[in-house]
Image (cartoon, coloured by chain):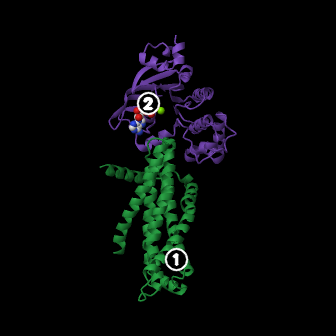
Chain colours: A purple, B green
Amino acid sequence: MIEARSINKSFENKDVLKNINIIFERGKINQIIGQSGSGKTVLIKCLVGLFEVTSGDVIYDNRNFTRMSMKERKLLRQEIGMVFQGGALFDSMTVMDNVMFPLRMFSKGTKKEMQERADFCLDRVGLNDAGNLLPDEISGGMQKRVSIARAIALNPKYLFCDEPNSGLDPKTGVKIDDLIEEITLEFGITTVVNTHDMNSVIQHGDNINFIFEGTLEWQGNKKDFLDSGNERLNNFIYSTELLKRVKP
Amino acid sequence: MNFFVSFGSYLLLLKSTLGKPPSGKYFRRQLVDELSLIGLNSLGIVLIISVFMGAVLVIQAGYNLQNPLIPRFTIGNGVRESLILEFSPTIVSLILAGKIGSSISSQIGSMRVTEQIDALDIMGINSASFIIFPKIVAALFSFPFLITISMVTGMLGGYSAAVIWDIVSATDFILGLHLYFYPFEIIYALIKTIIFAFLIVTISAYHGYYVKGGALAVGKSSTKAVVYSSIAILTANVLITKLILI
Ligand SMILES: Nc1ncnc2c1ncn2[C@@H]1O[C@H](COP(=O)(O)OP(=O)(O)O)[C@@H](O)[C@H]1O
Ligand SMILES: [Mg+2]
């Protein structure tokens, strides 16, 4: 479980996040949704400490991450996996080396154990044949899957995904979403997913947090999502002509 | 004001770059890559400019020293002095600032905008040290070689020009190269070189590391990297010369 307590974040004098309180539960896909520029990426980066919060606390299972020393944070980060919006694969390394990277850096196992773990992770995302390719040589969907494999290499307790299916065709996007859900349930991970993809929300939204211009505007799940009665949420959901037409 | 803020964050970046390195498991591999990128790949351009620099120096000196009272070996002597003291360490470093500086800052900049640096940070790896430190080591190691090679090829270029256009006799030219030679000048040149290498890598890395935005910003940062490294080299050159030679 991860808890965001009264998080505020400003850049220079621009307030990007305003008093965000969210509980992200274990073994669940916890979603942060909202329009482009609403502050989703900034929020996820505050949670993992890539940005320092201006005020507020981030608590990882009763451990206050915000108040930790750099050394303690480093240790906790080995329990965190993150899938970045563009994949963020190391472009000078092969797919296999990308997945091996966190293992070589942090795992205490033997070479053979690391190799087995990397094979397992690549296999888990369905890419056991792609190990020798470079990130440039594979499709966007495959890059995202490698990124997931790298993120789960060290058996994380917490998994963060920033728009995991953006830039993918709908079918591939659905596959990535399903994969993240499977992994979350299989390993009991606390997963936080940023998305503006309605399909993901309707499919996987167990804990939906709608951010509007930096404030938490609405919380709920996929059952009460479509008829929340919240005007801003509705504007967001039914923003396209197609959806307006099918609106109940 | 802005300058001081930038200078402060440059120093902070240096601090984390030279601070405790992440595990050295990738260091050897990275060092080999960087040595070939910074050292080996620069060899060609260094050879070419040095040969031409040496040749032009001889032609110019020959033209300017037509006075029969000045012995011809002075040409060889002057070329040696110019090459060792200024042309090889400073001009070649300026050229390398263009070549290496822009490549370092665009490489690191693109790692920034594609979130590869964030990916390192999130794993708890000191990204500054991981990415920049091997480049510094490779540059500090390669530059003295490149500059020494430049001095030698510069003199060879000068020699060829002297002989081809009959500007000085080979004997006089070589006599000039040997006369009044203080080995300390080489040490002075290499000290300059090492400082220039450090400036080029760290200033370019700084501009890449703090890129904000997309591909356009990466391009801009690599232009800035070259401009600021060059200014830093020229400024440092004046200061070092004043400090060491006088
Ligand atoms: N490093 C930064 N410095 C200043 N402003 C930023 C920075 N990162 C993001 N922002 C601003 O914060 C706002 C939210 O951005 P972001 O979280 O990336 O949105 P999204 O919901 O699309 O992920 C935007 O207005 C953006 O300009
Ligand atoms: Mg975003």
Identify the element where label 2 is drawn: loop
The front one of A29 and A161 is A161
Classify 10 Å Cα crowding around label 2: few (below 14), some (14-19), many (20 and above). Answer: few
Alpha-carbon distance for marks 1 and 2? 61 Å
Total marks placed = 2
The front one of A74 and B26 is B26
Quarter holding ligand 1: top left
Q: Where is residue B179 in the image (x, y as percent from the top left)?
A: 46, 85
In the picture, measured across the screen, residue B224 lies left or right of residue A12, that is right
Numbered disc in front, either 1 or 2? 1
Q: What residue type is labelled 1?
A: Gly
The front one of A108 and A236 is A236
Q: Residue at x 56, y 58 (%)?
A: B37
Q: Circle 2 sits on which residue?
A: A37
Q: What residue type is labelled 2?
A: Gly
Q: Position of residue A121 (x, y in %)?
A: 63, 37
Label 2 residue near ligand 1, CB within 8 Å? yes
Identify the element where label 1 is drawn: helix
Q: Where is residue B60 in the image (x, y as percent from the top left)?
A: 46, 76
Residue A83's disc number:
none
Q: Which chain carries label 2?
A: A
- Residue placed farthest to the top in the image? A248
In the picture, measured across the screen, residue A243 lies left or right of residue A131, that is left
Give above or below for A68 relative to B206: above
Q: Is residue B15 at least partly visible in the picture? A: yes
Q: Mark 1 lies on which chain?
A: B
Q: Which residue is drawn at 44% across and 25% down?
A: A23
Q: Position of residue B71 (x, y in %)?
A: 44, 88
Q: Which residue is drawn at 63% across and 41% down?
A: A118
Q: Circle 1 sits on which residue?
A: B158
